Amino acid sequence: MLGNFFEYFLSTGSNDGRLAVLGATSGDTGSAAIYGLRGKKGVDCIILYPNGRVSEIQERQMTTVPDDNIHCVSVEGTFDDCQDIVKASFANQEFRDRVKLGAVNSINWCRVLAQTTYYFWSYFRVTDAEKDVKEVNFSVPTGNFGDILAGYYSKRMGLPVGDLIVATNENDILHRFFTQGEYHREDIQATISPSMDICVSSNFERYLFHLAGDDSTTLANWMSAFESTGKLTISGKMLDKARADFKSPGLILMPP
């Protein structure tokens, strides 16, 4: 969908008719972005992924697309390192404007907006089958916080969502935030779910804006402190609000 939008608007002369789409992936969404943008006129797609930290099939899906406008780059580091490169590129206004940078994956708001449809569709499917159900709970495997953020916005739009459960692996910075109020950076552990091997979730900043009462100054202060110390801590009523918005109940063992 996004690739077709890009191609259409570029064909009308928007953005001088060209766009360099830059994205970072922990595995899953890189190939989705590549296949959505392959062959699109006026668009170059550059996807960064952490070397040795995606599955073999994910790597093959990304690196075997022969289209001239697709550029897949393996980065020595973690997904967070890939994200840092992307964020630094967008923060450099001269570079961003010169190469006509564009965003893909959940850094782009359109991605989160499209994901809200999952929740509406799922809700109506469940309530059609179970007439007495009033609210639906969603447990979401969470890495970059994009999908479950779409659930949060769906709930704010009025969808009768019950609990939004943040499911993480050993890289549990989000679990620690919603249980202890501590968003503290730690080294990333490689797991069997590499798409969730993320320490700093890029979409979490969007939620923090609302947690701060839609106050951009407070958010900027929080993120500045986090960048310098690697720590963000909340408590009291603010932690109570975060716990009301999202649940992270503890260790749940999934059956084999």
Image (tube, rainbow, N blue to C red):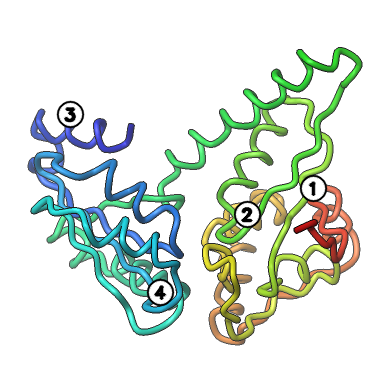
- The amino acid pointed to by label 3 is Tyr
Query: Which residue is rendered at x = 39% and y = 67% of the image?
Result: 56
- Return the residue nearer the eye: 216 or 164: 164
Q: Tag 2: residue type?
A: Phe
* N-terminal label among 3 and 1: 3
Q: Is residue 212 left or right of residue 147?
A: right
**Viewer-nearest residue: 57 or 8:** 57
Look at the picture and state if 34 lies above or below 187: above
In the figure, residue 119 lies in which quadrant?
top right
Instruction: Tell whether 18 sits left or right of 163.
Output: left
Counting residues from the N terminus, which is met first, the one under dot 1 or under dot 4?
A: 4
User: Who comes first in sequence, dot 2 or dot 1?
Assistant: 2
* For the residues bearing labels 2 and 1, Cβ distance under 8 angstroms: no
Q: Which residue is mark 4?
A: 84
Q: Marks 3 and 4, how far apart in space? A: 30 Å
Relative to 189, 61 lies left or right: left
As helix, strand or loop, the secondary structure at mark 4 comes to: helix
| Disc number for residue 43 | none
How far across and down, in percent of the image, does residue 255 sit? 80, 56
Q: Which residue is mark 2?
A: 209
Q: Amino acid at mark 1?
A: Asp
Q: Residues within 10 Å of mark 1 (few under 14, many from 20)?
A: some
| Mark 3 and mark 1: Cα distance apart in space | 38 Å
Identify the residue shown where x is 47% and y is 74%.
80
Q: Residues within 10 Å of mark 4 (few under 14, many from 20)?
A: some
Which amino acid type corresponds to the residue marked 4 in the rendered image?
Asp
- Mark number for residue 245? 1
Residue matched to label 3: 8
Looking at the image, is 157 positioned above or below residue 229? Answer: above
